[in-house]
Image: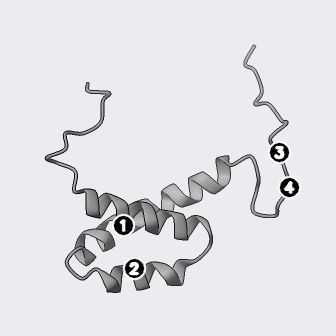
Amino acid sequence: MNDGPPPEDIVDPALAGLAEEITTQLQGGKARAVEAIIERHPAEAGALRAMLPTLRRLAELARVVSPRNPRGRDFSDRRPPVDA
């Protein structure tokens, strides 16, 4: 098992940047901005649409594990339960 980053020849930096931009927009609740990003990059549109379900799940997960929930309550002082 390889724990390091994927080799540079496998990762398309432009596509990775767009995926990060889309994830950021989704985390901010700006789903409409996602379609605009995809439309501005027709060469990557197919790959971005294929990744979209995963990017949505990542954005949702980021919101759930964030110390601040969507309603603005701060839970950063809470510690996860310790298994006995």
| Local crowd size for mark 2, using a 10 Å CA cut-off: few (<14), some (14–19), many (≥20) | some
Task: Give the residue drawn at x 41%, y 66%.
Answer: 53
Q: Quadrant of the N terminus?
A: top left
What amino acid is found at the position of numbered circle 4 in the picture? Answer: Arg
Q: Find out whether the residues at labels 2 and 1 contact each other: C-beta distance under 8 Å.
A: yes
- Which label was assigned to residue 18? 1
Spatial separation of the CA atoms under disc 4 and disc 1: 30 Å
N-terminal label among 2 and 4: 2
N-terminal label among 3 and 2: 2
What amino acid is found at the position of numbered circle 2 in the picture? Answer: Ile
* Element carrying mark 4: loop
Spatial separation of the CA atoms under disc 2 and disc 4: 30 Å
What amino acid is found at the position of numbered circle 1 in the picture? Answer: Leu
* Element carrying mark 2: helix
**In the rendered image, which residue does mark 2 sit on?**
37
* Element carrying mark 3: loop
Spatial separation of the CA atoms under disc 3 and disc 2: 32 Å
Q: Is residue 68 left or right of residue 50?
A: right
Spatial separation of the CA atoms under disc 3 and disc 4: 6 Å
**In the rendered image, which residue does mark 4 sit on?**
73
Q: Nearer the viewer, mark 2 or mark 4?
A: 2
Q: Nearer the viewer, mark 3 or mark 2?
A: 2
Q: Find out whether the residues at labels 3 and 4 contact each other: C-beta distance under 8 Å.
A: yes
N-terminal label among 3 and 1: 1
| Local crowd size for mark 4, using a 10 Å CA cut-off: few (<14), some (14–19), many (≥20) | few
Residue 14: quadrant of the picture:
bottom left
**In this view, which residue lies farthest toward the left?**
9
Q: Which x, y percent locates residue 79?
A: 79, 30
Task: Give the residue drawn at x 48%, y 63%.
Answer: 23
